[in-house]
Image: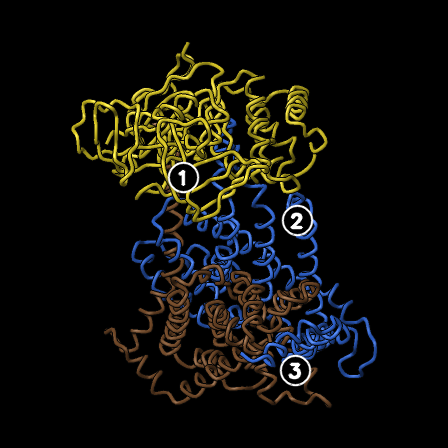
C-alpha cells in the first residue's frame, strides 16, 4: 500500500537540473534514507516533499491526495533541520506546543500533548528551559518532539545528526529509529553518511548528481551495488585496473599478479582491460584456510580505526586496503614486511565501465 | 503558480517600493543642493560657486584646520583605544562592561552639554587649557569615541586575537611588535572605518569649534550661510563628496579582507 | 637561534602572575586618565553646577525649581521629546523596512552593499550641510517646492513650512533611518531561514510567523535601536540651529542660548537644563533595560 508517492519529479534551478526523474513509492511506517554526497539533490527532494520547493515537473501524492503545489503550511508533514531550528524565544514546552497553538487546540489539549512528547524524548525536567540552555542532542530531541506533536503523516529529517558529536550521533540515531518504530510513522532521512544510512533504514535511495543510482535495502545496497558510484560511495572499496588473461577460468592480471574472479568474464576477450573491485574486509592474512587468491604483498601502511585495523598492502603494482578485526592478542605485521594475503574469488568483482 | 511564489513576488514588489523610497529620500536633498549650487550665475548653470569656494582663502584656511583636527583626532583615538580594546579582549575581560559604558557615554550626554561642561572645567586654574588645541582634539576624540571604540572592538572580534598573539609570542615577538606589526595590520579595515567616521564627525561638528573659538569648517559654513546663498551649497556638496569618498575607500579596502561591512558604524550628532 | 635567546623568550611565561597583572593594568591607564579628565570629570561638574548659583556659587534649588515650573522650559523639553520620539519611531520603522527589504526582500545583492554605504554616509551627513540640503530642497524656493508648484500643489499654501516642527522632523529623518538600517541589519541577518521554514512546516501563516517568532526575536534589538535613535535626535543641535536659526525651542537650543553668556542668560539654568536631559536619557535607557529584561529572557 503506497503511502507517499513521488513520480517523475524533476527540479531545475535557473537552468541547472538539480533533481532528475525521481520516482519512489514509500509504504506506511517505512524508514527511507536519501544517501549521497552534497549537491546530489537529496535535500532538494526532501524540501519538495515539505513544500519549500516546487517540482518543475512531476507529482507528489500523499494518501491518494496530490500535494505537489500545496503550501508548506497546508501539508501535514513534520520537518527536522540540521541546525535544529528551535525558536530561541520560546521554552522547550512552547516550542513543542507551537504547531498545536497555531491549530488553535485548547490549552489543556496542548499541555497534555506536550507532556506526552516530553516523556517520549525524556526531557520532562527541561520543559521550561530555553533552547540555549540545552545541549545539541537535547535540542534535536526537542525538535523531533515539536515535529511529532502535530501527528504528521510523514516525518522528514534533513541531516539531523550532522551537527552533533560522534557519540551523541550514534545514540540519537537509535533513539530516532526506536521512536519511529514505536509510533509507526513514515520517515524520510537525508544523510551523506553511509554508515548512518545503513544502520537506520528500511530502504536506502542512493543519489548522485540529481539522479537515483539505486534503491534497495541496506543489505542490497552494500553487497550488490548496481553502479560504480554506489560501489564506491557505500562502504570503502578497492578498485584496480586489470587485464583479462584467461576468460574461461576467470584469470586476471592485476599489476603483474594473477587474480582469479568468480565474476562472469567468459564473454571478454583475452588481453581486455577491465576494472575490478574488492571490499577491504574480504582480504585476510594467509592462514591455514587458503582462499582462491593467494597473493604476495608488502605492508605499506597501518591505520588503527578502533574495532577495525586498516592495512594498506602492495600487491604487485597495485595498492589495496584490507580491513581486519582488531584483536589485541594478534600481532600485526610491521610496515615494510613481506606477507601473504588471501581473498575468495567471489570477492573480486568486475565493474561495468 | 502556487501560494509560495505568489507570496514571494508580492514581497519583492514591496522590497523595491521601500528601496526606491529610501533612495529618493537619500538623493533628492543632494540633487537639490547640487542644482542650487550651480545657480550662482543668473539663468545659467555654472560652477561659479565652486570657483568662489576654492578661491576663498577663508574656506581653505578653515577647512585645512578641520582636516588637521580630524587627523589628530584619529591618531589620538587609535593610540588610546587600540591598546585598550586589545587588552580587554585578551587579558582583562572584567573591564569590558565599565569601559564599554564609558565609551558609550558621549552618546548619552548631548554634545552641547558636554562642550559647556568642558569649557567650564578647563577655563579655571589649574586646568586652564581652554585656549589650547589640546582640549579641542581631546574633545573631538571623546565625541568620536563611541564609533572609534566599537569599530576597533568589532575588528578585534573578527580576528582571533589570542591565537595571533600567542603565535607572535612563540615566534619571539615583543608586545610592541605584536600590537603594531600583527594586530594593527589585521584590523586596519576596522580602524579605517572608525577613522573615517571620526573624520566625518570632526568635519560636521559645529558647537565644539564654535565655543572653543577655533578655526574649523562647520562654523565657517554656518557663518557663510548668513552671508551668501550659493557658496554654502557648494560647500555642502564638497563636504558630502568627501564623506562619500571616505566611505568608498572603506568599502574598497574592505573588499576581500572581510569584516568591512560589519565594522561600519553610524555616526551621531 | 642561540640558547640565550630561547631562555629570554621563555622568561615571560615563567614570571609570577602578579607581575603580569600590574603590566596589563598599566595598559589601561591611558584610557582611564583620558576619559576621566576629558569626559567623566567635566560631566560630573554638571550635577554640581545645576545646584550652584552662577554668580554667588552658593547652593541653590532655584534652577531646578524654575525648570519644573517654567512653562517655556517645560515646553522646550516637550518639543524635544516629541520630535525625538516621532523621528525615532518613524525612522525606526522606515529603517527597519528598508533593511529588511535589502537583506531578505530578494533584491539583487549589490542593493544591499549600496544601501549600507548610503547609510554610512547619510547617518554622518548632519549638522549644517544637512540643513542646507533641505533648504535647497524644500524651502519656499527649493527645487522640490518649485516642482510641486509647477504641478499645481504649493505645500506652503497647505500649512507646511520647513522651519517648524514637522519640517525639522523630516530633516531629522534623514540621519535617523540610515542609523536604524546600520544598527538593525545584523539582527535581521541573525533571523535564520530555518525558523520561517520550521514555522511554516508547523502550519503557521507568514503573519503568525511574524507574530510569534520573528517579532519577539527582533524586539530586543529594535528597542535598543529606537532608544539609540531617540538619543541621537534628542541631543541634536547643529541641524536645528542651522535650519531654523533658533526659532524652534528645542532644549539643546535653549541650553545654547543660556550658556552663550549674554545679558539675559544664566549658565546655572543651562546646566540644570542639561542635567534634565541626562535624566530623561537615563529614563529612556532604564526603560529599555527593563523592557529588554522582559523580552530577552531567552538570550544567553
Q: Tell me where residue B226 appears, x and y as whole percent.
A: 45, 79
Residue C292 has which mark? 2
Residue at image mark 1: A321
Q: Which chain is brown?
A: B
Q: Is residue C102 above or below residue A259?
A: below
What chain does mark 3 sit on? B
Q: Which chain is yellow?
A: A
Q: Nearer the viewer, residue B15 or B251?
A: B251
Mark whose residue sits in front, 1 or 2: 1
Q: Which chain is blue?
A: C
Q: Is residue A48 above or below residue C289?
A: above
Check contact, mark 2 vs mark 3: CB within 8 A. Answer: no
Are callouts 2 and 3 both on one chain?
no
Quadrant hosting residue A9:
top left
Check contact, mark 1 vs mark 3: CB within 8 A. Answer: no
Residue B119 has which mark? 3
What chain does mark 2 sit on? C
Q: Report, in whole angstroms, how far the alpha carbon at label 1 lies from the one at label 2.
A: 60 Å
Q: Report, in whole angstroms, how far the alpha carbon at label 1 lies from the one at label 3.
A: 82 Å
Q: Which quadrant: the C terminus of chain A? A: top left
Most extreme residue toward the right, as rendered? C59
Residue A188 appears left or right of A266: right
Are callouts 1 and 2 both on one chain?
no
Amino acid at each position: 500500500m503506497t503511502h507517499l508517492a513521488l513520480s517523475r519529479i524533476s527540479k531545475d534551478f535557473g537552468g541547472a537540473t538539480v533533481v532528475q526523474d525521481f520516482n519512489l513509492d514509500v509504504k506506511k511506517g517505512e524508514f527511507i534514507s536519501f544517501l549521497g554526497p552534497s549537491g546530489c539533490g537529496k535535500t532538494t527532494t526532501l524540501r519538495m516533499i515539505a513544500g519549500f520547493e516546487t517540482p518543475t515537473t512531476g507529482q507528489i501524492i500523499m494518501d491518494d491526495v496530490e500535494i505537489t503545489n500545496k503550501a508548506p503550511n497546508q501539508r501535514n508533514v513534520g520537518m527536522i533541520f540540521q541546525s535544529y531550528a528551535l525558536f530561541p524565544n520560546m521554552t522547550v514546552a512552547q516550542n513543542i506546543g507551537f504547531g498545536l497553538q497555531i491549530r488553535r487546540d485548547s490549552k489543556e489539549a496542548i499541555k497534555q500533548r506536550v507532556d506526552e512528547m516530553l516523556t517520549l524524548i525524556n526531557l520532562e525536567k527541561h520543559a521550561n528551559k530555553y533552547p540555549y540552555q540545552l545541549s545539541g542532542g537535547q535540542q534535536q530531541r526537542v525538535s523531533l518532539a515539536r515535529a511529532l506533536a502535530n501527528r504528521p503523516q510523514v516525518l522528514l529529517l534533513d541531516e539531523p545528526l550532522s551537527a552533533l558529536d560522534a557519540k551523541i550521533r550514534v545514540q540519537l540515531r537509535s533513539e530516532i529509529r526506536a521512536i519511529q518504530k514505536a509510533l509507526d510513522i513514515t520517515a524520510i532521512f537525508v544523510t551523506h553518511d553511509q554508515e548512518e544510512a545503513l544502520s537506520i533504514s528500511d530502504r536506502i535511495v542512493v543519489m548522485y548528481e540529481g539522479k537515483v543510482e539505486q534503491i534497495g535495502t541496506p543489505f542490497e545496497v552494500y553487497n550488490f551495488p548496481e553502479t560504480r558510484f554506489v560501489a564506491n560511495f557505500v562502504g570503502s572499496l578497492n578498485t584496480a585496473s586489470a587485464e583479462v588473461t584467461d576468460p574461461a577460468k576467470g584469470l586476471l592480471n592485476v599489476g603483474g599478479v594473477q587474480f582469479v574472479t568468480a565474476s562472469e568474464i567468459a564473454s571478454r576477450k583475452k588481453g581486455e582491460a577491465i576494472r575490478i573491485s574488492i571490499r577491504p574486509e574480504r582480504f585476510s592474512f594467509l592462514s591455514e584456510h587458503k582462499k582462491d587468491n593467494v597473493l604476495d604483498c608488502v605492508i605499506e601502511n597501518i591505520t588503527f580505526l578502533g574495532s577495525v585495523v586498516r592495512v594498506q598492502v602492495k600487491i604487485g603494482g597495485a595498492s589495496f586496503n584490507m580491513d581486519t578485526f582488531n584483536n589485541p592478542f594478534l600481532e600485526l605485521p610491521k610496515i615494510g614486511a613481506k606477507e601473504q594475503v588471501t581473498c575468495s574469488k567471489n570477492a573480486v568483482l568486475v565493474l561495468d565501465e | 503558480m502556487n501560494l509560495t511564489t505568489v507570496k514571494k513576488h508580492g514581497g519583492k514588489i514591496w522590497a523595491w517600493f521601500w528601496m526606491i523610497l529610501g533612495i529618493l529620500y537619500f538623493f533628492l536633498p543632494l540633487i537639490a543642493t547640487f542644482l542650487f549650487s550651480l545657480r550662482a550665475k543668473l539663468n545659467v548653470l555654472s560652477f561659479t560657486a565652486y570657483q568662489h569656494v576654492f578661491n576663498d582663502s577663508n574656506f581653505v584656511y578653515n577647512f585645512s584646520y578641520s582636516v588637521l583636527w580630524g587627523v589628530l583626532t584619529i591618531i589620538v583615538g587609535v593610540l588610546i583605544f587600540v591598546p585598550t580594546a586589545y587588552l580587554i579582549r585578551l587579558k582583562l575581560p572584567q573591564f569590558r562592561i565599565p569601559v564599554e559604558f564609558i565609551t558609550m557615554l558621549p552618546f548619552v550626554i548631548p554634545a552641547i552639554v558636554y562642550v559647556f561642561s568642558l569649557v567650564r572645567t578647563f577655563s579655571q586654574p589649574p586646568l586652564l587649557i581652554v585656549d589650547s588645541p589640546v582640549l579641542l582634539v581631546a574633545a573631538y576624540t571623546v565625541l568620536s569615541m563611541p564609533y572609534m571604540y566599537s569599530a576597533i572592538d568589532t575588528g578585534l572580534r573578527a580576528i582571533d586575537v589570542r591565537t595571533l598573539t600567542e603565535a607572535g609570542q612563540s615566534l619571539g615577538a615583543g608586545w610592541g611588535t605584536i600590537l603594531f606589526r600583527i594586530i594593527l595590520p589585521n584590523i586596519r579595515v576596522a580602524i579605517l572605518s572608525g577613522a573615517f567616521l571620526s573624520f566625518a564627525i570632526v568635519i560636521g561638528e559645529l558647537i565644539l569649534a564654535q565655543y572653543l573659538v577655533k578655526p574649523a569648517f562647520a562654523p565657517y559654513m554656518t557663518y557663510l550661510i548668513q552671508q551668501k546663498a550659493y557658496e554654502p551649497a557648494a560647500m555642502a556638496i564638497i563636504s558630502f563628496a568627501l564623506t562619500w569618498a571616505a566611505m568608498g575607500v572603506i568599502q574598497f579596502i574592505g573588499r576581500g579582507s572581510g569584516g568591512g561591512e560589519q565594522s561600519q558604524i553610524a555616526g551621531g550628532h | 637561534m642561540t640558547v640565550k635567546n630561547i631562555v629570554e623568550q621563555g622568561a615571560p611565561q615563567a614570571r609570577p602572575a602578579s607581575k603580569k597583572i600590574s603590566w596589563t593594568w598599566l595598559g589601561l591607564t591611558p584610557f582611564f586618565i583620558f576619559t576621566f579628565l576629558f569626559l567623566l570629570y567635566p560631566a560630573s561638574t554638571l550635577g554640581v553646577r545645576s545646584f550652584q548659583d552662577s554668580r554667588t556659587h552658593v547652593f541653590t534649588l532655584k534652577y531646578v525649581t524654575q525648570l519644573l515650573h517654567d512653562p517655556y522650559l517645560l515646553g522646550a523639553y516637550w518639543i524635544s521629546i516629541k520630535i525625538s520620539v516621532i523621528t525615532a519611531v518613524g525612522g525606526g520603522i522606515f529603517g527597519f523596512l528598508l533593511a529588511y527589504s535589502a537583506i531578505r526582500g530578494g533584491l539583487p545583492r549589490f542593493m544591499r552593499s549600496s544601501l549600507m554605504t548610503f547609510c554610512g554616509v547619510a547617518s554622518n551627513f548632519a549638522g549644517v550641510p544637512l540643513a542646507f540640503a533641505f533648504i535647497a530642497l524644500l524651502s519656499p524656493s527649493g527645487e522640490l517646492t518649485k516642482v510641486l508648484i509647477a504641478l499645481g500643489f504649493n505645500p506652503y499654501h497647505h500649512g507646511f513650512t520647513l522651519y517648524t516642527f514637522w519640517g525639522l522632523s523630516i530633516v531629522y529623518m534623514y540621519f535617523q533611518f540610515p542609523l536604524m538600517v546600520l544598527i538593525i541589519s545584523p539582527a535581521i541577518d541573525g533571523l535564520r531561514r530555518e525558523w520561517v521554514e520550521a514555522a511554516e512546516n508547523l502550519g503557521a501563516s507568514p503573519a503568525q510567523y511574524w507574530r510569534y517568532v520573528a517579532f519577539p526575536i527582533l524586539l530586543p534589538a529594535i528597542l535598543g535601536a529606537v532608544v539609540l535613535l531617540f538619543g541621537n535626535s534628542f541631543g541634536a543641535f547643529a541641524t536645528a540651529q542651522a535650519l531654523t536659526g533658533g526659532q524652534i525651542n528645542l532644549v539643546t537650543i535653549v541650553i545654547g542660548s543660556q550658556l552663550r553668556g549674554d545679558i539675559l542668560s544664566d549658565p546655572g539654568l543651562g546646566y540644570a537644563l542639561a542635567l534634565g536631559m541626562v535624566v530623561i536619557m537615563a529614563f529612556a535607557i532604564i526603560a529599555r533595560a527593563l523592557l529588554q529584561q522582559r523580552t530577552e529572557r531567552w538570550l544567553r
